[in-house]
Image (tube, rainbow, N blue to C red):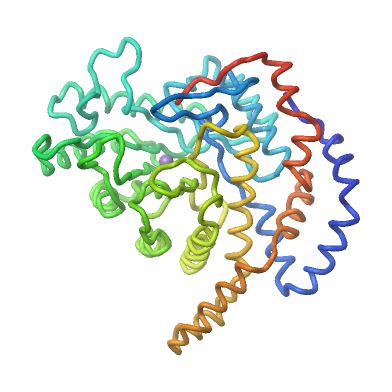
């Protein structure tokens, strides 16, 4: 389903007068409002192909209807999101779930929807039908060389698919680890994983990046071979300048100080990508900003501060992606909410009075520092985000448009009760 831009324009007209009044107010109220809106209008967050269908838990999956059944359908869904919010102009594919049959046709489709291909993702956390050797006891860490080689070959195949699509990065997330004490020799598992990653790294095109994603626990519950940012950074440093750490919000132990982690990784020039989601307990796959929006702002505040300190381009120099997929919402509505939360956090980070904060820090004025952050967080920046959408020809109120125009019902009409493949 392709949205007609005139339909969006027509829908916007009804809300335009009220929006203009608010924008006129905030333009005067916030000194750098115009500069913030310009940055917001350029910002894009990639949508993973696996978030377009209803996700599951290990207990069950309750699929919706009208879900995308093919790669083309998935791209249309992301195109739909991008038309509505003007900030979802990239899709992240998962191999083998999304192997294109006709690359040229897929690239043309992406161009027609104004989409780019973000990082490609490998999968050695499941056995695929017909796969000769099992990943039950790990992939890149496996004690058996042949299993490691199979996993290396898969990752190189993913890079080759990505090259044909115009991707510039591969994300390697490993479920490797152990469930019981004594199961693994930690040092050997690390060495095997490092050597496997080195073989994948050697196959990287010169303008590509390799992202090493970490996760504290699950599916392995005693040790994870890439379990935290320290281990990921060890691998990235040993691999070389094209290897970086990828931070996924849900992949930390509860209460980890993620804002400090991203600050230090940026300082080291080793932060390359970000997976957004939210959680109460662990890797809960909840909508971005649904549980801890203040933490999301604090993270973005460090991201913007760190990127500015290194002269980085906010939109292009880090990979921004949502990584969440769960059971109880319409996936497209969920993604609209997630992107909105990210844009609000980014707007708040841009609004933060950096000079005043630096002064407060230099004077050990703890109260002033807290006031600066919390006053910023309590400022309503929704109008600025809406203004950025308007300038991109997107919807002033994406979720309202989606519901009033009955987009899901239309998708069900077009696709029937189709269920997405994937997780
Ligand atoms: Mn992730």
- Ligand 1 quadrant assignment: top left
Instruction: Specify the farthest residue to the bottom.
Output: 363
Up/down of 366 relative to 107, above or below:
below
In the picture provided, is 251 more to the left or to the right than 233?
A: right
Instruction: Specify the farthest residue to the top.
Output: 130
Viewer-proximal residue, 238 or 59?
Answer: 59
Residue 146 image position (x, y, % from top left)? 17, 21
Up/down of 42 relative to 172, above or below:
below
Going 50% across and 85% down the picture, which residue do you hit? 360
Residue 244 image position (x, y, % from top left)? 36, 49
Quadrant housing the C terminus: top left
**Residue 339 shows up from this direction:** yes
Quadrant housing the N terminus: top right
Going 82% across and 35% down the picture, which residue do you hit? 5
Residue 392 image position (x, y, % from top left)? 75, 47
Going 49% across and 22% down the picture, which residue do you hit? 98
Instruction: Specify the farthest residue to the front.
Output: 59
Residue 163 image position (x, y, % from top left)? 46, 30
Splitting the image into 4 quarters, where does residue 344 fall? bottom right
Viewer-proximal residue, 359 or 258?
Answer: 258
**Residue 166 shows up from this direction:** no
Up/down of 45 relative to 409, above or below:
below
Splitting the image into 4 quarters, where does residue 46 fall? top right
């Amino acid at each position: 389903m392709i949205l007609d831009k005139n339909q969006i324009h027509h829908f916007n007209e009804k809300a335009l007068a009220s929006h203009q009044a608010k924008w006129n107010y905030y333009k005067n109220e916030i000194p750098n409002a115009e500069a913030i809106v310009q940055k917001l209008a350029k910002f894009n967050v990639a949508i993973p192909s696996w978030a377009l269908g209803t996700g599951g838990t290990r207990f069950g999956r309750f699929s919706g209807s009208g879900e995308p059944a093919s790669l083309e359908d998935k791209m249309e869904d992301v195109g739909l999101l991008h038309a509505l919010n003007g900030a979802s102009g990239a899709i992240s594919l998962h191999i083998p779930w999304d192997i294109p049959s006709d690359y040229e046709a897929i690239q043309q489709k992406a161009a027609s929807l104004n989409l780019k291909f973000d990082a490609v993702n490998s999968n050695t956390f499941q056995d695929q039908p017909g796969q000769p050797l099992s990943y039950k006891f790990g992939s890149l860490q496996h004690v058996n060389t042949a299993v490691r080689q199979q996993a290396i070959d898969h990752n190189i195949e993913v890079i080759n698919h990505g090259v044909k699509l115009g991707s510039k990065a591969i994300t390697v997330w490993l479920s490797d680890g152990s469930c019981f004490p004594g199961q693994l020799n930690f040092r050997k598992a690390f060495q095997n994983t490092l050597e496997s990653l080195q073989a994948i790294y050697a196959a990287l095109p010169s303008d590509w990046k390799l992202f090493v994603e970490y996760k504290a626990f699950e599916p392995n519950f005693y040790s994870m071979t890439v379990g935290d940012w320290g281990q990921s950074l060890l691998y990235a440093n040993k691999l070389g300048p094209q290897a970086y750490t990828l931070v996924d919000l849900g992949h930390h132990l509860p209460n980890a100080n993620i804002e400090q982690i991203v600050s230090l990784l940026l300082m080291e020039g080793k932060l390359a990508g970000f997976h957004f989601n939210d959680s109460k307990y662990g890797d809960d796959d909840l909508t971005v900003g649904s549980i801890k929006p203040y933490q999301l702002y604090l993270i973005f505040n460090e991201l913007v501060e760190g990127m500015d300190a290194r002269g980085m381009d906010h939109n292009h120099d880090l990979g921004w992606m949502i990584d969440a997929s769960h059971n109880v919402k319409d996936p497209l509505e969920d993604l609209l909410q997630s992107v909105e939360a990210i844009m609000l956090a980014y707007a708040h980070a841009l609004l933060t009075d950096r000079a005043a904060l630096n002064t407060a820090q230099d004077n050990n004025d703890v109260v002033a520092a807290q006031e600066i952050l919390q006053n910023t967080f309590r400022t309503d920046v929704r109008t600025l985000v809406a203004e950025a959408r308007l300038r991109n020809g997107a919807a002033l109120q994406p979720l309202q448009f989606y519901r009033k125009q009955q987009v899901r019902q239309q998708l069900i009409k077009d696709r029937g009760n189709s269920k997405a493949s994937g997780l």
